[in-house]
Image (tube, grey):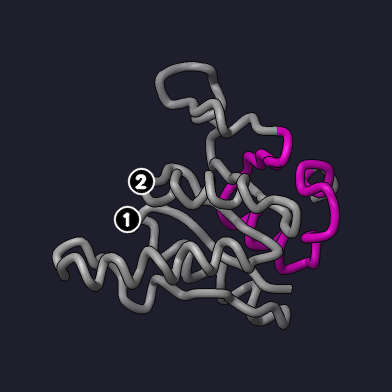
Amino acid sequence: MRFYVSTGIFSAQRAAELADVLRRRGHEQTYDWMEHGDVRREGASRMGEVAFNELRAVRDAELVVVLLPGGSGTHTELGMAIATRSNKRIILWSETGDEFSFDERTCAFYFHPSIERVTCSFDDLKRLLDREQIGSDLNRALLDM
């Protein structure tokens, strides 16, 4: 399965850890933005190149995992995932669930019918994906842990 992990640059380490788990399971990462990190100061050409690569990666992924909290790019990628949802599963993860609390942290798109909201520790998320829970209801699998 092809996958993409989206989050803010400040959570790049977590994204890398999750990508490692999925690659060890034999899945293919569509684009590893963590290799280059923050490109905001590298000019318009580089930013355009990264934007194109990330858009293509989200479009082509069969699984998009979004780690909250995220930045503006994260939310753009979530929107692209929803717009191209016919070929993919979209998992929106929060460690605390605070982003799903119907206050200023909440985004209406978090509640799009195509989104699977998952609240658990990051270690539990890694364990779920490492146990090949990708094809099942992650929230139900959490109850079995």
Residue 141 makes an appearance in the image: yes
Q: Is residue 139 magenta?
A: yes
Pinpoint residue 64: horizontal percent, then vertical percent. 62, 58
Res 123 quadrant in image = bottom right
Q: Say which residue label 2 marks.
A: 71
Element under disc 1: helix
Q: Nearer the viewer, mark 2 or mark 1?
A: 2
Q: What is the magenta range? A: 113-142
What's the amino acid at mark 2? Gly
Q: Which residue is mark 1?
A: 10
Most foreground residue, 90 or 50: 50
Mark toward the start of the polypeptide (2 vs 1)? 1
Which residue shows up at 84% across the image and 59% down it?
A: 135
In contact (CB < 8 Å): disc 2 and disc 1: yes
Report the residue at 44% width, 71% height from top. Answer: 53
Any part of residue 98 in sight: no
Q: How far, Cα to Cα, is label 2 from label 1?
A: 9 Å
Looking at the image, is 54 positioned above or below residue 92? below
